[in-house]
Image (tube, rainbow, N blue to C red):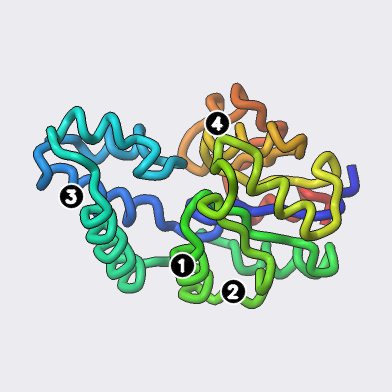
Amino acid sequence: MKFEAILFDCDGVLVDSEPITNGVLCAMLNEAGWPISAQDCMDIFIGKTVRSEAARIEAHTGQPLTDAWMAAFYARRNAELEARLTAIEHIHATIERVHAHHGGRIACASGADRLKVEMQLAKVGLAPFFDGRIFSGHEMPATKPAPDVYLAAAAALQAHPARCAVVEDTVTGVTAGVAAGATVFAYAPFDDGDALRAAGAEYVFGSMAELPALLGC
């Protein structure tokens, strides 16, 4: 299929932010009284918003998930990302090629808050490729796994969702892309991607260097 637009998730696809963000979250949950391990924290929260798991957090900590706690989390998270964030390997060459091939019809459609997405893309030098085409699930009626953010990105690029490719790395994100009607390409550098396939990913790949050819660029 010749795609009209390519829609990229951000965390874990463009930037290697997940270990940093989850490290901060794990530390703060432990401080709040939930002795959760780093691996369990990744398993529960990757691809999700913290607030979407509020009931679980409150059950384990015995405390309400307050706006003040979330503000402290965002501040610590952003400071760590500013200090330590790197891009996903091979992503710069891949984005440059996909951007050129599709005449700039690419977008970043993330479940994260806009401030985080824009800061991260600027930090690793990818912001110019997505200028004016960044979409946040926080600004939609529903965030991932709902398809809203991908539908909004496709509409802004005047592309039919069924003619879009979505690039994701989590079950939550793949579910959102499939629900939007797009063809989902799942980035799975550390495992065989079976869970991503089960969620509906049509293609699974292990290196961003492979993606342009898979997209027909």
Q: Earlier in the sequence, mark 1 or mark 4?
A: 1
Residue that mark 4 sits on:
193
Percent x, y of residue 129? 67, 72
Point out the residue furthest to the right here.
Answer: 2
Q: Is residue 75 above or below residue 16?
A: below
Q: Earlier in the sequence, mark 1 or mark 3?
A: 3
Quick one: SS at disc 2?
A: helix
CA gap, disc 1 to disc 3?
21 Å
Quick one: SS at disc 4?
A: loop
Percent x, y of residue 200? 66, 27
Which residue is rendered at x = 26% and y = 49% of the image? 25
Q: Earlier in the sequence, mark 4 or mark 2?
A: 2
Percent x, y of residue 188? 54, 40
Q: Which is in the foreground here, disc 3 or disc 2?
A: 3
Q: Earlier in the sequence, mark 3 or mark 2?
A: 3
Q: Earlier in the sequence, mark 2 or mark 1?
A: 1
Point out the residue furthest to the top here.
Answer: 198
Observer-nearest of 43 and 94: 43
| Neighbours of disc 1 within 10 Å: few (<14), some (14-19), many (20+) | few
Residue that mark 1 sits on:
115
Toward which corner of the image does residue 75 lie, by quadrant?
bottom left
Residue that mark 3 sits on:
28
Residue that mark 2 sits on:
127
- Amino acid at dot 1: Leu
